[in-house]
Image (spheres, helix red, strand yellow):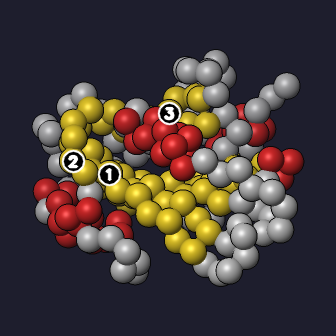
Amino acid sequence: MQTAALQDDFTKEFITSKEETEKGYYTFKSNVGGYTMLYPVNAVMDQTYYQYRGQEYEAIYFGEGREEENYGYSVVGNFEDRKVTQSIDSNLDLLIGSTDLLTPQDFEKYTVEDNDVYFAEYRQDINNDKNGFYLHFLGYIKSQTTDKAISLEYSSTCISKTEECNLDLTEERERAKKIFHSVRFNP
């Protein structure tokens, strides 16, 4: 059976091989040549959201909905290769966006390979339904050796607001971090 990522003509442009890199993941290669990362086999890129500017900027959006599991997630990413990536607090502010639930000081900083990773998470309640919430995981991944960086937001929720929902914070955190930690910037 062919996966959703390989069935979608736009998505498969970013996939380096039809073979899984790790169980459940392909390798995603940026069209601007800036980075690679793990990509879930059943996620599909949103072509209308995608944009790039030269080799210094790329915006991506992908996700997957599993109605039978009452589960969905999306990932929004913005890659840059410019000096502005060195302004960490400004970039964290941009990643936080309009939420008042986080500040740049809420991010945990650690190193994976040659990247500094800034990680934070929060729960967003959107209504009083039992499933009326999103789990958000934010990552700003900055190369230690170049001006390359990518901001990623992984958001998950239950699709149905009335059916049973088994969204597990620990599992979702691990899924987000698996993608975030897999980012490798090209020299």
The local secondary structure at tag 3 comes to: strand
Sequence-wise first label, 2 or 1: 2
Does 46 sit above or below residue 4?
Answer: below
- The amino acid on which the numbered mark 1 sits, given as a three-letter code, is Phe
The local secondary structure at tag 2 comes to: strand
- The amino acid on which the numbered mark 2 sits, given as a three-letter code, is Lys
Q: Residue 124: tell me if it is visible.
A: yes
Residue depicted at 26% across the width and 32% down the height: 112
Sequence-wise first label, 3 or 1: 3
Circle 3 is placed at which residue position?
38
Q: Which mark is residue 119?
A: 1
Are dots 2 and 1 in contact, CB under 8 Å? Answer: yes
Q: Which of these two is toward me, 177 or 148? A: 177
Q: Which mark is residue 133?
A: none
- Left-right relation of 171 to 138: right
Does 169 sit above or below residue 19?
Answer: below
